[in-house]
Amino acid sequence: MISRFQFLTQDVAQITHQELAETVCKNGIQWVQLRAKNIDFETYLQIAKDVKNICNRFNATLIINDNVEICKAVNADGVHLGKKDMPIAQARKILGNKMLIGATANTVEDCIQHQQDGADYIGLGPYKFTATKENLSSILGLQGYTQIMKLAETQIKLPIIAIGGIKVEDVQPILQTGIYGVAVSSAINLSAQREKTIADFLAQFS
């Protein structure tokens, strides 16, 4: 149910969120998180409707970043909540039990808390520096993931997804720490050869 390879759209010059979603779905990615920043509700809603239609065509999962209202309005598959977003329990009341809720974590304590609060999966990061996210938490790196996964072995049953500046060559070392999967944004969105980059990432999971 939770994909081991997750894609996030981002604001990129000269290409829309819809075009990014279409490109990745066409090339085999099955999990799209719509991450649009600094736009008004109506604009976000329209983009979300368009991306939902694209994901439906390709039978891909659609997760909405940060915005529970948009998630409910377009009947997306779920929402991903950052550390400063709506509490998981409140989101669950609004969305019910059928929609997925992912939550951002930076420490093992975050992970345990999210599990207690009823999240379905955890986005753990950042792996390394990324310009995609403002107010970045402490960089974890392989050492951080290894330490957290050792602690998580007995206490955390949720899928943990690595995120933050991940490139193709990082995937195998990250998976070897015991992490369930990875989420990628800039490595695909800013690639001069998006289709090749997508294929290279997907090959890491075949």
Image: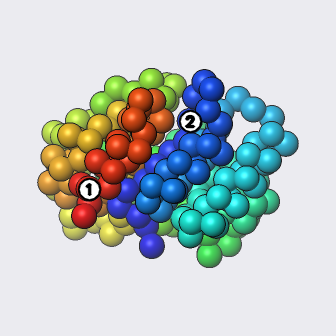
Instruction: Provide residue 10's location: percent of width, then percent of height.
Output: 56, 36
User: Foreground: 14 or 109?
Assistant: 14
Residue assigned mark 2: 10
Residue 20 visible within the image: yes
Secondary element under disc 2, as helix, strand or loop, is loop
Whether 116 is drawn above or below 10: the answer is below
Q: Amino acid at mark 2?
A: Gln
Give the spatial CA distance, label 2 vs label 1: 23 Å
Left or right, 102 with respect to 158, comes to right
Sort mark 2 into few (<14), some (14-19) or many (20+) by Cα contacts within 10 Å.
many
Name the quadrant containing residue 17. Answer: top right
Residue 68 visible within the image: no
- State which tag comes first along the sequence, 2 or 1: 2
Instruction: Provide residue 52's location: percent of width, then percent of height.
Output: 68, 59
Q: Quadrant of the N terminus?
A: bottom left
User: Foreground: 127 or 43?
Assistant: 43
Name the quadrant containing residue 82. Answer: top right
| Picture residue at 45% right of the left edge, 24% below the top | 131
Q: Nearer the viewer, mark 2 or mark 1?
A: 1
> Residue lying farthest bottom?
98
| Picture residue at 23% right of the left edge, 36% below the top | 141
Left or right, 66 with respect to 5, comes to right
Secondary element under disc 1, as helix, strand or loop, is helix
Residue assigned mark 1: 203
